[in-house]
Image: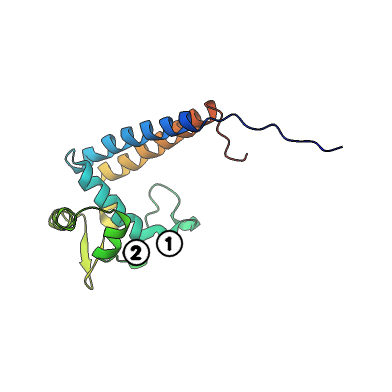
Amino acid sequence: MTTFSPVPADTRRAVVRIVATEMTKISRAMARVHGDDVIEYFVFTALWVLNSSHLIGDQRYVQLKSIPPDVLRKPASIEELRAALPMPADILQTYVKRLLEKGLAEEVSGKLVVPTAVFTQPEMLQGTSELYESVVQMVTSMRAAGFSFGD
């Protein structure tokens, strides 16, 4: 006798609404560190993601204050940044220049990197904690809407 698993309810619209709501809240909260400039937040975030995505899963850098050293950060070209975060070149250049002027990014051999020291600042550590709490809330809301992570 063949047994079929029940078809899960279609909760796509609810889940997308939850994710979009949390993304908006997160963007607003994280933009505070960037003078309430959400575009600066996105450019900054895209850059540090490019610098450190190869470290995902590295257990040495999973805790809040276990920040990867500069030597492990992979510098990114402006082209890689533009591919990760499509926007007009002049706008991207303006924000990259601003990050460099603020010390939130550095040039290394013609490429860009967010230095480790930036992530040790109290407001960055607080932002990381807030982002984590938002993700926990989002996962809780998604589960309540019927979404399963396969667990």
Q: How crowded is mark 2: few (under 14 residues within 10 Å), some or many (20 or more)?
A: many
Q: Give residue 142's position: percent from left, percent from top.
A: 50, 31
Give how far apart the Cα atoms at labels 2 and 1 are.
Answer: 9 Å
Q: Is mark 1 on a helix, strand or loop?
A: helix
Q: Do the residues labelled 2 and 1 touch (CB within 8 Å)?
A: no
Q: In the displayed structure, would residue 111 be above or below residue 115?
A: below
* Residue drawn 25% across the image and 51% down it: 43
Q: On residue 100, which mark appears?
A: none
| Front residue (pair 25, 119) | 25
Q: In the displayed structure, would residue 105 be above or below residue 145?
A: below
| Sooner in the amino-acid sequence: mark 2 or mark 1 | 1
Which residue is label 2 attached to? Answer: 73
Kindly identify the amino acid type of the residue bearing the numbered disc 1: His
* Residue drawn 29% across the image and 58% down it: 116
* Residue drawn 31% across the image and 39% down it: 126
Q: Quadrant of residue 73?
A: bottom left
Q: Give residue 45's position: percent from left, percent from top.
A: 30, 50
Which residue is label 1 attached to? Answer: 54
The single residue placed furthest to the top in the displayed view is: 144
Image quarter of the N terminus: top right
Q: Give residue 71's position: percent from left, percent from top.
A: 34, 68
Q: How is the image coloured?
A: rainbow
Q: Position of 59 compared to 125: left or right?
A: right
| Front residue (pair 98, 94) | 94
Q: Is mark 2 on a helix, strand or loop?
A: loop
Task: Choose mark 2 or mark 1, whichever is in front.
Answer: 1
Q: How crowded is mark 1: few (under 14 residues within 10 Å), some or many (20 or more)?
A: few
Kindly identify the amino acid type of the residue bearing the numbered disc 2: Arg
Q: Give residue 49's position: percent from left, percent from top.
A: 35, 55
